[in-house]
Image (tube, grey):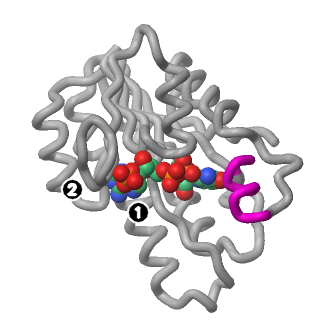
Amino acid sequence: MKTVVIGGTGLVGSEVVKLLGQGHDVITVGRTSGDMQADIEDKASVEALFDKIGAVDAIISVAGDGVFGGFDEEGDHAYERALQSKVMGQVNLTRVGHKYLNKGGSITLTSGAVAQHPMPNTAAIAIATAGVDAFVRTVALELDDDKRINSVSLSLVKESAKKFGMDSTHCVPAAKVAEYYRDVLGSSESGQVVLVQN
Ligand SMILES: NC(=O)c1ccc[n+]([C@@H]2O[C@H](COP(=O)([O-])OP(=O)(O)OC[C@H]3O[C@@H](n4cnc5c(N)ncnc54)[C@H](OP(=O)(O)O)[C@@H]3O)[C@@H](O)[C@H]2O)c1
C-alpha cells in the first residue's frame, strides 16, 4: 500500500509511520523534513509533490499549526495561522490528493477535540478544527470510486503536555494516538470524525 504521510516526521506522525511499517510503502513529507518536501499551505507545492509521487493508496495528514491564546488576545495572527494551516492546508491536500488516489483509497486528516469540547484559549484552533471536521463530512458525500475521507480528532498529546509543563495525567501518548490513524485507515468508514479518547 503506497501511503503518503504529511507530517510523518512530527511527534504524532513519526509514531503513525512506525506503526504502519510492513505492508505500507510509506513516503514521509514535511516542509523541510521527510523523504520529500512540500508545504500544504501552498497548493502549487502540493501539486508538484503529487506530480512526482504519482498514484497512491492512502494520504494521511498529521500536520497543521495552531496558536493558543485568548479569543481577542493573539490578534489576527492566531486566526490566520489556524485557518491557513489546519483548514486550507488540509483542504489543498485533499483537493489535489484525491485525484491521485487509487480506487478504494483513503484520506485521513487531523482535527482537534476542542471543536467538540470547548476549552479556554483555543478559539482559533476550535473553529479551524471544526472546519476540518465539516469538510471531511461533506467531501465524504462527494468522493467516488469507493474513496474515503475521515479525520482523527486529537486532544493534547502526553509528550506535548509534558513539554509545556502541563498536567499530562489524562493525556494519551503519541504512540497510542497513532493507533487511531492506523485503525481509521484499516476501516471501511468514511465521513467519520474519530475522537481520541482520554
Ligand atoms: N501534539 C499535540 O498535543 C496535539 C494536540 C492536538 C492537535 N495536534 C495537531 O496534530 C498535528 C500533529 O501534531 P504534532 O505535535 O505531531 O506536530 P509536530 O511534532 O510539530 O510535527 C508537525 C509535522 O508536520 C509537518 N508540517 C507542519 N506544517 C506543514 C506544512 N504546512 N506542510 C507540510 N508539512 C508540514 C512538520 O514537518 P516540518 O517540520 O518539516 O515542516 C512535521 O513533520 C498538528 O496539526 C497539531 O496541531 C497536536
Instruction: Tell me where residue 148 sits by quadrant.
Output: top left
Instruction: Give coordinates of residue 159: x percent, y percent.
Output: 70, 48
> Are the residues flagged by discs 2 and 1 in contact, CB closer than 8 Å?
no
Instruction: Give coordinates of residue 160: x percent, y percent.
Output: 67, 54
Q: Residue 43's mark?
A: 2
| Residue type marked 1 | Ser
The image shows residue 155, relative to residue 5, as above or below, that is: below
Q: Residue reaching furthest top?
A: 23
Quadrant into which the N terminus falls: top left
Asked if residue 90 can be seen in this view, the reply is no
Kindly identify the residue that appears in the image at 43 percent across and 77 percent down.
80
Q: How many labels does the image show?
A: 2
The image shows residue 172, relative to residue 100, as above or below, that is: below
Kindly identify the residue that appears in the image at 29 percent across and 17 percent down.
103
Kindly identify the residue that appears in the image at 62 percent across and 65 percent down.
126
| Residue type marked 2 | Lys
Front residue of 160 and 137:
160
**Highlighted magenta segment, given as a residue range:** 157-165
Kindly tell me whether mark 1's CB lies below 8 Å from ligand 1: yes
User: In the shown orientation, is residue 147 left or right of residue 186?
Assistant: left
User: In the shown orientation, is residue 75 left or right of residue 83?
Assistant: right
Front residue of 5 and 113:
5
SS under mark 2: helix
The residue that mark 1 highlights is 85
Q: Which secondary structure dominates the residues rendered in magenta?
A: helix
